[in-house]
Amino acid sequence: MSAQIEEIHPGAKPLAHGEDSAISAYGLADRPDERQDWSMPPRLPSLVDPPILFAHRGARAHVAENTIEAFSLAVTLGATGLESDVWVTSDGVAVLDHDGVVGPFLRRRPIAETARQDLPSHIPSLAQLYDVCGTEIPLSLDIKDANALDAVLLAASDAGDSARERLWLCHPDWQRLAEWRKKTDGIRLVDSTRLTKIKEGPERRAAQLSNAGVDAINLHFSDWTGGLTTLFHRFSLNTLGWDAQHERMIRELVHMGIDGLYSDHVNRMVNVARSDGLMS
């Protein structure tokens, strides 16, 4: 797979009205905070330029996570990617939720044992997300239930246009990802892990991922260094960083040459991107 990824075109549908007030209300400054001293070495090259700004579970720092409101607000605030966790219902529908269980305390039941119509109304299906936000914005999905893969692929295919090619599917078992490669042509597969769990060392893992057809590796922001991004880029692997919650963390990842990052705070990601000239 080519190391060059096509230019990002966040074509998601904005909220119907109130965009200016939303931007003001959630802390997107017209001018970034110039009082900070952000002196840093030159930015290392990335494979995706500008890097994708994934809104973790939507704009969860501002509204209830994994809701249509959260995803819509994230797009309005300037996120260039969306992220969520995906499960499959007992009747085969891909839905977006973090914990994968529903119901009151002591009577909670798995989503896998619940029909779509019996889920709480705030839990959206993947199809609903596509209906509201479109198919042009990159979408990172953490596959929490391996049985959800087929439902995800069906929803993406039904959405049409570029839904499949904008998907980034994450899982902590890279060997399972390798098994999925044949049925996920055109979709990016992501090894989501921690540096301490890579017992064979990062260079060997990079070779394994490249040989298996896995496209990217996702590490906690604190695991990344410029040397590591450079190493994985040598194997044409995209580098992603999660849990980047403060502007300092976001800026450090960007300067390390990261290809995408995840944050609860869309406003902070956008402020850094603007101040670094990555978006207007």
Image (cartoon, rainbow, N blue to C red):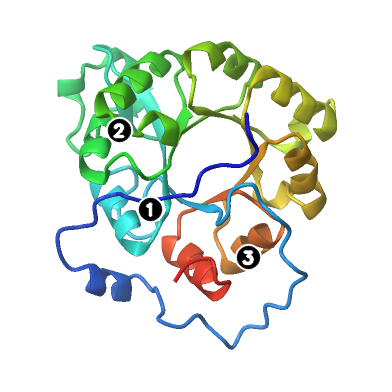
Q: Is residue 145 left or right of residue 51?
A: left
Tell me if mark 1 has few (under 14), some (14-19) or many (20+) residues whose alpha carbon lies within 10 angstroms of its own.
Answer: many
Q: Position of residue 115 (x, y in %)?
A: 21, 16
Q: Position of residue 216 (x, y in %)?
A: 63, 34
Task: Please give the label number shown on residue 134.
Answer: none
Q: Looking at the image, which residue is at 81% across and 34% down?
A: 202
Q: CA distance from mark 2 to mark 3?
A: 33 Å
Residue 109 seen by the camera: no
Q: Which image quarter holds the N terminus?
A: top right
Q: Earlier in the sequence, mark 1 or mark 2?
A: 1
Task: Please give the label number shown on residue 251.
Answer: 3
Q: Give the amino acid at mark 2.
A: Asp
Does the residue at mark 2 contact the one at mark 3 (Cβ under 8 Å)?
Answer: no
Tell me the mark number nearer the camera, choosing from 1 and 2: 2
Q: CA distance from mark 3 to mark 1?
A: 20 Å
Q: Looking at the image, which residue is at 70% across and 51% down?
A: 222
Tally the numbered discs: 3
Residue behind mark 1 = 60
Q: Position of residue 176 (x, y in %)?
A: 59, 15
SS of the residue under disc 3: helix
Q: Earlier in the sequence, mark 3 or mark 1?
A: 1
* 50 shown above or below 100: below
Q: Quadrant of residue 26?
A: bottom left
SS of the residue under disc 2: loop
Q: Give the amino acid at mark 3.
A: Arg
Observer-nearest of 36 and 79: 79
Observer-nearest of 66 and 55: 55
